[in-house]
Image: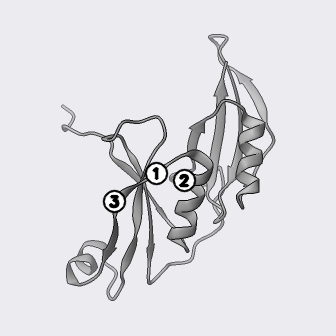
Amino acid sequence: MPIQARYVHTNLIARDWQSLSRFYCDVFGCHSVPPERHYKGSDLERGTGIPGSELHGVHLRLPGFADDGPTLEIYTYTLLEPGPVPAVNRLGFGHIAFTVDNVPAAREAVVAAGGAVAGEIVTLALATGAKVTWCYARDPEGNIIELQSWN
């Protein structure tokens, strides 16, 4: 029997949490859920397993959800572990997706706000006949975003 659970957030570790938070608010209409978070000390160190680190950031309410909906948690650690550039086919969490009215216009907005193109805009058909037009883009720190529109 499954445990009682409800999805609440996805965490994104950023080099500059304030700048990346502004990107998601400006481009996708996310909004901050106060207060900002600033953690340090032995409890954080024990919980994360990272001695001497501090954690700073914010939760952003995702568009299309009520006040109790899930958030995108954008944090930075004072001690960051470098990683490879995200790839769409790398094991683990791959991307965050937003449904939009117009995929080309949304991709232009991402690029205009400091993001980048990560693939072509394509349309795929499901066996049911439903079609999804989508593309991958990157936020200013290189994280992958899927932009999609169903018809």
Q: Earlier in the sequence, mark 3 or mark 2?
A: 2
Location of residue 144 in the rendering, given as x and y in whole percent from the top left corner: 63, 53
Quarter in which the N terminus is drawn: top left
Label 3 sits on residue: 34
Residue 53 in the image: above or below residue 145: below
Please, what secondary structure does the residue beneath circle 3 have?
strand
Location of residue 104 in the rendering, given as x and y in whole percent from the top left corner: 78, 38
Residue 26 in the image: above or below residue 133: below
Residue 61 in the image: above or below residue 143: above
Residue toward you, 33 or 100: 33
Q: How is the image coloured?
A: one colour
Please, what secondary structure does the residue beneath circle 1 have?
strand
Location of residue 54 in the rendering, given as x and y in whole percent from the top left corner: 36, 81
Q: Are marks 1 and 2 in contact (CB under 8 Å)?
A: yes
Between the residue at mark 3 and the residue at mark 1, the CA separation in whole angstroms equals 9 Å
Answer left or right for 66 relative to 81.
left
Per the rendering, the mark at residue 3 is none
Between the residue at mark 1 and the residue at mark 2, the CA separation in whole angstroms equals 6 Å
Q: Amino acid at mark 2?
A: Cys
Label 2 sits on residue: 25
Residue at image position (60%, 53%) is 26
Label 1 sits on residue: 31
Mark 3 is surrounded, within 10 Å at the Cα level, by few (under 14), some (14 to 19) or many (20 or more) other residues, namely few
Residue at image position (60%, 58%) is 23
